[in-house]
Amino acid sequence: MPEWDTLVAGPEQQTALAGVDVAQVFAASYRKLVVQLYGIVGNASEAEDLVQEAFVRAYAAGPRFTRVDNPEAWLRTTAVNLYRNRWRKMRNFARIKHRLVEAPDLPGIDANIEVVDALRRLPENQRVVLVLHYFADRQVHQIAEELGIAEGTVKSRLSRGRDALAVLLGDVDDVEGGRP
Amino acid sequence: MSEQRLRDLGREAEELVDLPDLGSLQRRGRALRLRRQVAVVGAAAVVATAGVFLFQDRSTDAPQPATPRSEPYTVYPGAQMQDLEAGTYELTPSRDGTEPTVLLTVPDGWNSWEGPNRFDGHRAGDSNEEALARSTWVVGVTVLDVQGVATERCQPTVGATGIEMTYHQTIRAVRDIPGYEATVDRAGGSGLFGHPSTLIRLTPDAAQQACARDSQLFGTDTNGGVGLRGDLDVYVVDVEGLTYVVVANEVGSPPQAMRDELAGILASVEFVQPD
């Protein structure tokens, strides 16, 4: 586990994919993004659908997409916002119940299903920062920038999310009430 | 410990993800780009006609990721069979988030069904469902992203194939629905929706009318399951290459005021491109 200071001030992540085309980003980032969205939405089919839709948007941007500084973050932000917009649109339709009940997992995830279920039980704002930090290796200031929220808010959600996750997974030794 | 398990999940799960066909995503992206360009050219033509200035999309900036939508309109609640408050609603005919949604405005007194509808038969304390069962007249409108059209009289269900029907395929299929007398008006709906459209007036024969409540005319992947009764005005609309069907129906002899409200709702229908 990284020290908190390192976490907060961590090195700038290289945006090695900047300037490359969509196919290259797809090869490097598709699987990562699906797993990240799976962690956030708790539904493997939905995650694949959202990430694919984000790539459709990237293709729709045409050559301008090569100007994006961090294509993986762009795609992730697009997928997360599409999820939020879609959820809002569908919340009153009867099928949302159907979708929630089914919530398919990634085939073969059995060894980690307990962690997936624990993530599903956290509030969305905690899930998002946990996924960005632990799945996408984003530092606090990067998460704050990506989500458009204050660093203090990221720290707080990360801390609460970690504590809640530890309780849900029975790792009570991990709970540190005094950490920022 | 739990943090390590989280990291392990993130790393190990990547191996479980299958790659989709990139060509398919590329084709969908190009289609979306084309639709956006057509929409921009259409907007520019309107502005130029008004004699103001010619607008062109010459942006070379990096594109912005999709943003969370502000919600200026109420999400249409679907078939809840409850009173709708007067206002503008956003209805989502397609599950594909890159395809347009529909804004429509309803006055007081309308009911939430697949699309808004209105009927008589109300008594104090009764539900809208009970009133509808007693009704002598009904008017209604809905907008569908059609993936299938009935090919048999009194067809109980119409499958949603997942394949979009073209504008002309849809016109032919609607014209040929068994059990209806069809009149095609190529100019019907002209100017009504801001897109090319064809009106097909469908009048059921007695057998079709008898089974209409339990039969389906259109297969869709969202707000389908429609038991459309009575005379139908079916507008097939070409929204920049995507085909939608706007259905207005009348059962019995609705008062003229209700027909006027129905016409007003139809006139308010607006197709909105996603962000």
Image (tube, coloured by chain):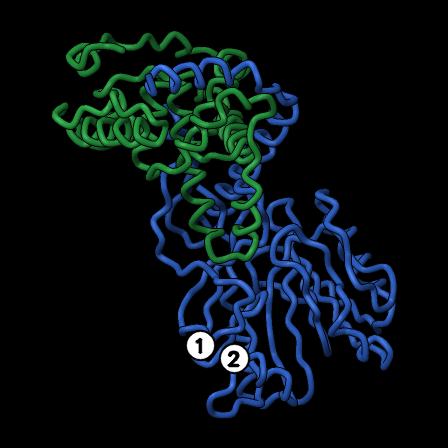
Type of the residue with mark 1:
Pro
Q: In this rendering, is residue B18 above or below B250?
A: above
Dot label at residue B205: none
Q: Chain of mark 2?
A: B
- Report the front residue among A139 and A164: A164
Q: Colour of chain A?
A: green
Between A26 and B126, the residue placed more toward the observer is B126
Q: Nearer the viewer, residue A169 or A73?
A: A169
Which quarter of the rendering shows the C terminus of chain B? top left
Q: Position of residue B126 (x, y in %)?
A: 51, 86
Residues at marks 1 and 2, CA–CA distance in whole angstroms: 7 Å
Q: Classify residue B254 as left or right of residue B8.
A: right
Q: Is residue A150 left or right of residue A72?
A: left
**Residue B266 visible to an observer of this rendering:** no
Crowding at label 1, few (<14), some or many (≥20) Cα neighbours within 10 Å?
some
Q: Secondary structure at mark 1?
A: loop
Q: What residue sits 52% from the left and 52% below the top?
A: B101
Q: How many marks?
A: 2
The residue beneath circle 1 is: B107
- According to the colouring, which chain is blue? B
Check disc 2 and report the residue beneath it. B261
Q: How far from the left and from the top, in percent, is residue B112?
A: 52, 70
Residue B85, compared with residue B125, is above or below; it is above
Q: Position of residue A146 (x, y in %)?
A: 29, 26
Q: Chain of mark 1?
A: B
Q: Residue at x 43, y 26 (%)?
A: A115
Task: Pick whichever of labels 1 and 2 is earlier in the sequence.
Answer: 1
